[in-house]
Image (cartoon, rainbow, N blue to C red):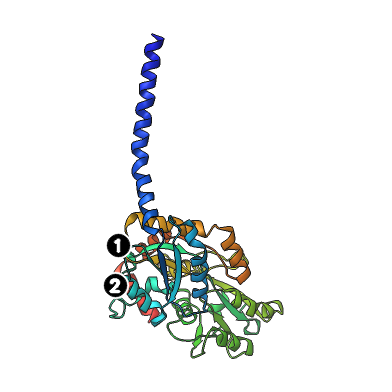
Amino acid sequence: MTRLMNARGAQALALALALGLLAVTPARAQTEAVRDFYAGKRLTLITSASSGGGYDQYARLLAQHMTKYIPGAPSMIVQNMPGAEGIKAANYLAAIAARDGTVLGGLQRNTGLARFYQPDSANIQFDVQKFTWLGSMQQEIGFMLVRTASGVTDAAGLKTRGITASSTSRNSPASIYPRMLNELYGARIKVIEGYGGSQEALLALERGEADSHVSGGTSAAFRARYRPWEKAGAVRIILQLGMERDREYPDVPTALEIVDNADAKRIFEIAFVEQVMGRPFMLPPDVPKDRATALQRAFDEALKDKDLIADADKRGIELDPVGGASIAKLLDTVYSTPPSLAERIRNMVK
């Protein structure tokens, strides 16, 4: 009897091992196929930014460290393709770039909502829902800086006292967010446009030409600029423009927190998808699934890499990564917005 039980046990063990091998073999074969494909290859990371800018810095940091996590350890170069606020690169990646997993893209955060805001634009020749999103290296949060001399000390004061805000152009966050606050919260902000860049718009705040400035993001350079004014008591941050509060300002509310109806919250949630996308990276449509999965994993692992983190710290590059699946889900939500609400948002952005 004991011999019979032992024989049956051995047979069961052999069967289990065989089934296990059958289950593992396809996955192993896929990994080997990806490794064989990438071995000796040179990948191209196309960034929509000009050389030396913030997006370019993130792209070069990623290219330097991501390849060690791609099976086959290929090399990677960065190619700059600026133009039309990122639209030129996105169009190229959608229609012309190789779809075999040898080309990656680094887009601007507003690219994700470009088609949503301008559904009839002939210049936008891509569908962001067909891209494979790797993720973002940094999420953005905007700040509303207000001069203390304006008399506005908190978000509630925006309803009772009219103030001015400096901006570059009508389609910049520095103009769009104040317009949204006016319509959705009852703020009384008059935007002064025409400043040559964010630094000029901040200078207007420093000189007293404008009472406030609403930023789209909060880079290290931006923070370094306003901190002396904040320390001196000349300006204060009264509101944050993003999905969550910045860790440095846990007591300052977001726009999402101050509006009191569902449509207003929904509109800000859509607008702030760009903030979550921050510094996004993606693949062209139709990249083979096994290679796309390998690149998504490599992106995630690279953002945990101690050498990448150390390099980012040396260069003053902030990291707050978000996964590709989260970006894809947010975009799916945006593009399923009811038509009436979508039209209302587009009218505010125009």
Quadrant (top left, top right, bottom left, bottom right) of the C terminus: bottom left
Mark 2 Cα-neighbour bin, 10 Å: few <14, some 14–19, many ≥20: few
Q: CA distance from mark 1 to mark 2?
A: 11 Å
Which is more toward the observer, 182 or 286? 286
**Location of residue 25 in the rendering, given as x and y in whole percent from the top left corner:** 35, 41
Residue beneath the point at 39% across and 70% down: 112
Element at label 1: loop
**Location of residue 212 in the rendering, given as x and y in whole percent from the top left corner:** 57, 83
User: In the rendering, which numbered label is found on residue 286?
Assistant: 1
Residue position marked by numbered label 2 in the rendering: 95
Residue beneath the point at 61% across and 63% down: 310
* Quadrant in the picture for residue 262: bottom left
Among all residues in the image, which is located at the extreme right? 232
Element at label 2: helix
Which amino acid does the dot numbered 2 rest on?
A: Ala
Direction from residue 272 to residue 207 in the image, left or right: right
**Of the image marks 1 and 2, the number of the one nearer the N terminus:** 2
**Is residue 117 something that shows in the picture?**
yes
Residue beneath the point at 51% across and 66% down: 64
Quadrant (top left, top right, bottom left, bottom right) of the N terminus: top left
Which amino acid does the dot numbered 1 rest on?
A: Asp
* Quadrant in the picture for residue 95: bottom left
